[in-house]
Image (cartoon, rainbow, N blue to C red):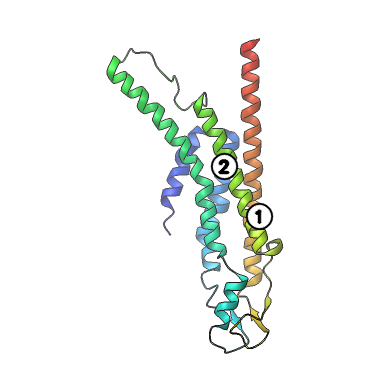
C-alpha cells in the first residue's frame, strides 16, 4: 500500500498545529505510520498461511482462522490510521477555503481591499471549531478501535494455541498461531501509541479551550 499521500497530508497540517499537535504528528508518523509500514505489515504478511491445525481435514484451518481472527489486525490498523488522520484534511481544506476567498476578494477589489482574514491559518472563528472537532473525532476513532481490538482479542492477547471445534473439523483440534510473541509485542506497542495519541489530543483540546477562555476574559477586561 502506498502511504506517501498520507505523509504529505500530515506534513502540510504541521504548520497549523499547536505544540501538542506537532508532538501528536511526530508520534503518528514515527511510532505508528513508520512502524506499520516497515515492520507490522511484514509480521502479519504470512498470518493465515502459517496458521496450522493438527488435522488434515480440508477447510478446517481456514474456518478456525476465520473464527478466531474475523478481522485482520493489519487491515484494522490501516483503517485506523486512515480515519485518525482524515480530520486533519478538514483543517487544511478550511484554511484553503479562507485563502481562496481572500484571493477572490483581492482580485475583485484590488490589492488594497480589506482583508477578510489577517492570518488565514490562525485558529479563530469557524477554523477554531473545525480544529476542535477534528480533535474530538481523532479521540473518538482511537477509542473506538481500541474497544474493537479489545472485544475481538481479549486484553489484546494473542495465544500461542487455540482450540477449535468448528465444522468441518472432525473434533476439537489444536491450532497454532504463527509468531504469537512477536505479534503480541507489536499489538501492545500499537495500543500504547494509540493511548498516547489520545492523551495528546485531550491535552490539546484542553489547551485550546483554556486559551479561548483566557482570550475572551482579556477582551472583556
Q: Circle 1 sits on which residue?
A: 147
Give whichever of discs 2 and 1 has the lower sequence position.
2
Residue drawn at 57 percent across, 33 percent down: 132
On the image, the x and y values in percent for residue 201 come to 62, 40
Viewer can see residue 110 = no
Q: Is the residue marked by circle 2 packed among few (<14), some (14-19), or many (20+) residues within 10 Å?
A: some
In the image, what residue occupies the spot 61% across and 85% down?
169
Residue 168 at x, y percent in the picture: 58, 84
> Which residue is at a point 36% across and 25% down the rendered structure image?
101
Horizontal side of 196 relative to 96 (left or right) equals: right
Identify the residue at horizontal 32%, vertical 19% (top origin): 106
Q: Nearer the viewer, residue 24 or 145?
A: 145
Is residue 85 left or right of 100 when viewed as pictured? Answer: right
Q: Nearer the viewer, residue 56 or 17?
A: 56
Give the percent coordinates (x, y) of residue 36: 53, 58
Give the spatial CA distance, label 2 vs label 1.
Answer: 15 Å
- Image quarter in which the C terminus is found: top right
- Residue 97 location (% of width, % of height): 39, 30
User: Would you say residue 32 is visible in this rendering?
Assistant: yes
Q: Which mark is residue 137?
A: 2
The residue lying furthest to the right in this view is 155
Amino acid at each position: 500500500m502506498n502511504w506517501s499521500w498520507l505523509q504529505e497530508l500530515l506534513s502540510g497540517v504541521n504548520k497549523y498545529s499547536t505544540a501538542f499537535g506537532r508532538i501528536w504528528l511526530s508520534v503518528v508518523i514515527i511510532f505508528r505510520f513508520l512502524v506499520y509500514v516497515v515492520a507490522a505489515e511484514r509480521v502479519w504478511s504470512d498470518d493465515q498461511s502459517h496458521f496450522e491445525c493438527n488435522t488434515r481435514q480440508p477447510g478446517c484451518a481456514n474456518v478456525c482462522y476465520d473464527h478466531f481472527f474475523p478481522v485482520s489486525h493489519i487491515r484494522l490498523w490501516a483503517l485506523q490510521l486512515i480515519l485518525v488522520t482524515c480530520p486533519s484534511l478538514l483543517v487544511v481544506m478550511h484554511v484553503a477555503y479562507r485563502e481562496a476567498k481572500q484571493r477572490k476578494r483581492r482580485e475583485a477589489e484590488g490589492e488594497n481591499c480589506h482583508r477578510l482574514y489577517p492570518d488565514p491559518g490562525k485558529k479563530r472563528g469557524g477554523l477554531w471549531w473545525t480544529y476542535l472537532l477534528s480533535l474530538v473525532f481523532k479521540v473518538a476513532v482511537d477509542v473506538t478501535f481500541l474497544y474493537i481490538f479489545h472485544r475481538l482479542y481479549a486484553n489484546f492477547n494473542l495465544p500461542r494455541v487455540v482450540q477449535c471445534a468448528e465444522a468441518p473439523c472432525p473434533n476439537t483440534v489444536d491450532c497454532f498461531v504463527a509468531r504469537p510473541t512477536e505479534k503480541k509485542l507489536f499489538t501492545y506497542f500499537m495500543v500504547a501509541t494509540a493511548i498516547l495519541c489520545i492523551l495528546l489530543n485531550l491535552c490539546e483540546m484542553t489547551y485550546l479551550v483554556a486559551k479561548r477562555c483566557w482570550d475572551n476574559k482579556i477582551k472583556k477586561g
